[in-house]
Amino acid sequence: MRLSQGAPGARVLAFGGYQPAEVVTNHDLAARIDTNDEWIQSRVGIKERRVAGPQESEIDLAVQAGGKALAASGLSADDIDLVIVATCTLEAQIPNAAGRVAHRLGIEAPGAFDVNAACAGFCYGLSAASDAIRAGSATNVLVVGSEKLSQWVDWDDRATAVIFADGAGAAVVGPSEVPRVGPVAWGSAGDKAEAITIKDRRSFLQQEGQTVFRWATTALHPVALLACERAGVDPAELGAFVPHQANLRIVEAIARKLGADQAVIARDIVLSGNTSAASIPLALSRMIERGEVASGDLALLLGFGAGLTYASQVIEIP
């Protein structure tokens, strides 16, 4: 029996992001439910979010983001041999998203599978991609986080309607002579799984906001620091901190505990809302586009959400 041997390390070649056109402001929501702009911003930090139309699926969003990442990577569809899609909002579990996304992007016969780790899904997918490249199971991998949360949210429920949104973000990951995707620090808190649930397809997303807030602001900064330690990176070396865009108060609370005051903090949630598995690659793609981070900077990623699951790693920005 033989084992394949892969590259010494992996690196992100490019990011891509996509958001649907329709903007829903806090004032729009206030016209429907008992809320207002000040109340929403003070609690979750969101000013507006994007929502996909009835004819735009999470597959459509993923294809748009994946296509942008592929174009920016300099690779062709023929170079991709594995596609991973992180999502928790498919209308049906079969067929999976990855195979359909690959087909629509012209990627012929790749390995293709989905990851459902909710808001931590992109970091899980990125780790799987890095491991596959280093093990020799894949050469170049497309990792996409794509969500259409609007179809799972009760728009008359103030607790969730103000938070969640739609979008997609993607990364192309390839081989590297030196590691540029650090080891993952991941785990779960299954005892708190009931904090975020969808009972069935006839139900909407339910969240125990205070439970999630307390857990995220107390339990997750050690995970982020562990990811830095495993990568051999001091937090003072970080150029960016890109956590899941769950809630601006959570983002800022975790950031204060990292000892990385020099790092640019992703605050994409203000204009994008919580897009679950899409939020980290979407936020980072926008930071790169705006010139807020530079190629070669080190970024600390931290995904966390339903399950409850979490994952963190340090990457070098392409």
Image: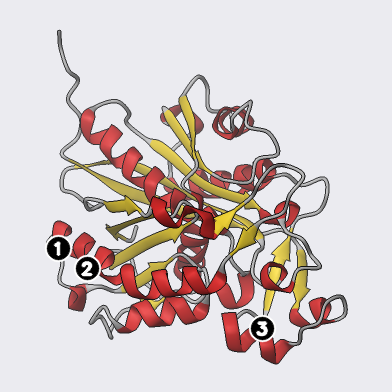
> Residue 281 location, x and y as percent?
47, 58
Left or right: where 151 falls relative to 216 = right
Which residue is pictured at 50% across the width and 45% down the height? Answer: 144
Which residue is pictured at 57% across the width and 46% down the height? Answer: 88
The residue wearing badge 1 is: 229
Looking at this view, is 240 or 292 the one in front?
240
Which residue is pictured at 16% across the width and 58% down the height? Answer: 231
Q: Which label lies toward us, 1 or 3?
A: 3
Examine the image and state in which quarter residue 27 appears: bottom right
**Which amino acid, mark 2?**
Leu
> Residue 61 location, x and y as percent?
65, 48
Which residue is pictured at 73% across the width and 57% down the height? Answer: 150
Disc 1/disc 3 C-alpha distance (Å): 36 Å
Mark closest to the chain's N terminus, 1 or 3: 3
Looking at this view, is 313 or 88 the one in front?
88
**Vertical comparison of 82 with 65: above or below:** above
The residue wearing badge 3 is: 40
Q: Are marks 2 and 1 in contact (CB under 8 Å)?
A: yes
Callout 1: helix, strand or loop?
helix
Disc 3/disc 2 C-alpha distance (Å): 30 Å
Disc 2/disc 1 C-alpha distance (Å): 6 Å
Callout 2: helix, strand or loop?
helix
- Report the disc number at residue 208: none
Examine the image and state in which quarter residue 318 appears: bottom left
